[in-house]
Image (cartoon, grey):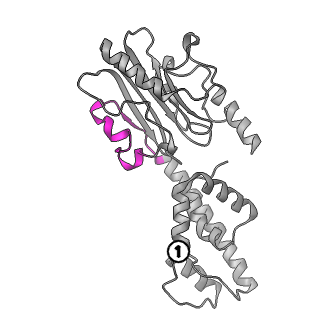
Amino acid sequence: MRLPCEVVRDLLPLYAENMVSDKSRELTEEHLAECSSCRAELEAMNSQTPDVQFRMDTAQEFAKYEKKKNRRLGWKIAGITAGVVAMYFIVHIVLILGVVGLLVADYSLAKKEVDTDVSHYSRYMGENAEEKYRSKWCMDESIFPEKITDDMQVQEYKMVYYNPWDSQFLSYLTVTYSDEDYETELSRLDDCGITPYKGYYTVTGFADDSDPIAMYADDYSGFVYAIHTPGRENTITYVELIFCNYFYDLDYKEYIPEEYLPLGFDATMDNPYQKQELEKS
């Protein structure tokens, strides 16, 4: 299972000094391969030079220094006795358990943000979105309109953000266009294209055996797509289902009409696609 960023960042000082187990190293490196933010944290750590001189005569001094410097080990440790090494691993285990405890607390306290005010659209969408809503696991949101204009008749809008461990997003926007604008928007979406998506999260297609107008699918992070809104002329619904670790932490069906979801879509915990992908790793 992919480690959360918070855990990896606690492990980075130990990873940089080659003082983690083989399993911890493997999980850390898998995370670094996918997370540019944590890679930047590691590079910044490696570029720093210790700004103090110190002695570590005892395991207690070593643990005290670790806590004071936020466990930044910017130098090579030489001549550590077997007793200090043993104490280090005890401290390490205690710290990891503490981190896990904090993460559990964060999970229980995390709140779902739900916004249905379309005037806030630019806060959540595109390159100019507020920082915590911007990256969205590098998913391409260009299928969604760049902005909401006065000539767009917005029928529905909802944005859901949840971050108990890692950020996840669910948004949908339904717009009715004039005849001319509808054709223009269909042309724009046609240029966006349709990436392969069937099979991801057991998706088999869409209602009425029709393809989406545009689709960006990722086998890990989910889908961004546009569909013809069922039962409405000149109307398009834009949807993004973005998460990580192969499942949603939230009950996504509570927040979006089922008719807007791909057929067969299953991103619940322990879904078949998640089990299939984890077996490969």
Residue 167 visible from this viewpoint = yes
Residue 69: x and y in percent read: 50, 77
Residue 98, compared with residue 207, is above or below; it is below
Residue 155: x and y in percent read: 33, 19
Residue 179, compared with residue 273, is above or below; it is above
Identify the residue at image location x=45%, y=36%: 141
- Which is more toward the observer, 176 or 250? 176
Instruction: For the C terminus, give its image quadrant.
Output: top right
Element at label 1: helix
Residue 233: x and y in percent read: 38, 9
Q: Residue furthest left?
A: 150
Please state if 100 lies on the left or on the right of 158 as rendered: right
User: Hey, what amino acid is under mark 1?
Assistant: Ser
- Which is more toward the observer, 258 or 152? 152
Residue beneath disc 1: 47
Identify the residue at image location x=48%, y=38%: 140
Identify the residue at image location x=33%, y=30%: 116
Instruction: Answer whether residue 117 is magenta in the image.
Output: yes
Which quadrant would residue 178 be assigned to in this image?
top left
Range shown magenta: 109-134
Please state if 205 lies on the left or on the right of 180 as rendered: right
Residue 45: x and y in percent read: 53, 71
- Which is more toward the observer, 193 or 210? 193
